[in-house]
Amino acid sequence: MVKTTAPTATAVATATEVVLPGVVEPDGLTVRRRPAPAPGPGRVLLAMEATGVSFAEQQMRRGKYFDQPPFPFVPGYDLVGRVVATGPGVDPALVGGRYAALTKTGGWASHVAVAAADLVPVPESVASADAETLVVNGVTAWQMLHRTAQVRAGDTVVVLGANGGVGSTLAQLARIAGARVLGTASPRHHDALRRLGVTPVDYRDPELYARLRGLAPDGVRAVFDHVGGEGIVESFRLLAPGGTLVSYGTASTRDVAGSSKAPVLKLFARLALWQALPNSRHAHFYNIWAGRRRADAFRGRLRTDLEQVFALLADGSLTAQVAARVPLSRAAEALRLAESGTVTGKVVLVPDAAVPRGGDASGT
C-alpha cells in the first residue's frame, strides 16, 4: 500500500443509514441522515451498491443475536460498493474500484467506512445485487462444505432450509462439487429447488426425518443444520459413519423469549459431547468469525474462498438467488419480506435511486 498523509477528497457530504433502536418490529427501524464518515488510517469509504438482509438481522431486532452490540446501532452484515475515498496509508488507486466487505454491523447505509484489508474485489461482469447474495452466504456455504465437511463428488448431503440465502447457495455449491442434495423447504419452494438439482422434502412433514432416511438409507455424508433446537438430534442420526453434522444457527429459537445465549450454549455443549464420543461421526458449529484474532490468516482465507465463489458466479456455474431488491429507505419492508418465509434466496437492499419510485420490491 502507498502511504498518504490525508484522506483523498470526496464529494460525499451526507450518508443515509438505517438504525435499529431496540427490540422492535420491522416498522420500528428508523432512517437518518448524518455527515458521511471520513475514512481513518488504513480505511476506505464505500458507496454502497447492495447490502443484504440476513438471518442475523432478524435475530438482532429481537435482541437474540449472540454477540450483537448495544442498541441503537446500524445493522448490515455485508455489502458491495465502490471506493469513493481512502484514508491515510491506503493506495488512492483503490478509488473507483468495486469491492465486497464483511462488516457484521453497519452495512445498511449509503456510505460505509471499512478497513482496506477487508476488501474483496468483485468482477465487473457481475451485478452488485447478485454479488451481495454471495458475500456472507457464499463464504459460509463454501467453508462449511469444503473446509468443515469436506464434501466430495458422489456424496449425499442434507441441507435444511435449502430455499434460504445460505441454503440455496450451499445446495448449488454441493451440486457443483458433484454431491447429491436433499433439501428441506415448504412445498411452495420445491419447484425452485428442483431447478437447482435438489431433491426437495417438505420441512413441515411430521415424518421428515423418516423420509430423509428413506432417501438415503445408508446415511449421508453431511447435514447442514441452521435450525438447532431438539431437531439437531435427528440431524445427527442421519449421518453415515464418517459423516459430519455442521450446525450454524438456532433458527428454531428465534421467536422464543429469554436469553439469546442460552440456546447457543446448549447447542455448543451438545455438539461438544457428540464430538467427544468414541464414534466415527463428527459434529461442529460453524462460525464465520472463527480465527479472526489471527487477522492476516483470517482475511486471507476469507478472500480466497469468496474469490472462488465470485468466479463461479461470473462463469455462470453459480446462480445468484436474489429474492427482491428493496430501496434502503424501505428497510422495514425488506426485513418483513425476509422474515415472511415466502421467498427463495436473499432480500437485497440497494440505494434508493437504484429502484424506480413505486417499483415492485416483492421480487426481482
Image: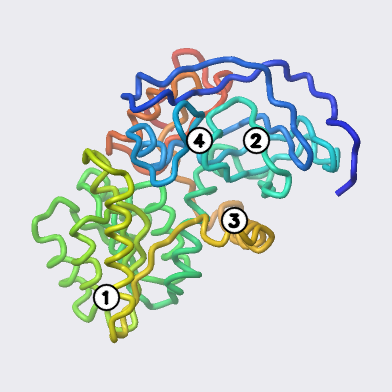
* Residue in front for this viewpoint, 300 or 351: 300
Q: Are marks 4 and 3 in contact (CB under 8 Å)?
A: no
* Residue in front for this viewpoint, 10 or 263: 263
Sequence-first disc among 2 and 4: 4
- Residue 266 x %, y %: 27, 58
Q: Amino acid at mark 4?
A: Gly
Sequence-first disc among 2 and 1: 2
For the point 20% across and 66% down, the residue is 233
Sequence-first disc among 4 and 3: 4
* Residue in front for this viewpoint, 28 or 179: 28
**Which residue, given by chain and number where applicable, does mark 4 sit on?**
76
Q: Are marks 2 and 1 in contact (CB under 8 Å)?
A: no
Q: CA distance from mark 2 to mark 3?
A: 15 Å
SS for callout 4:
loop
**Which residue, given by chain and number where applicable, does mark 1 sit on?**
239
The answer to whether 130 appears left or right of 56 in the picture is: right
Pointer 1 local density, CA inside 10 Å: few below 14, some 14–19, many at least 20: many
SS for callout 2:
strand
* Residue in front for this viewpoint, 180 or 268: 268
Q: CA distance from mark 2 to mark 4?
A: 13 Å
Q: Amino acid at mark 3?
A: Leu
Sequence-first disc among 3 and 1: 1
**Which residue, given by chain and number where applicable, does mark 2 sit on?**
81
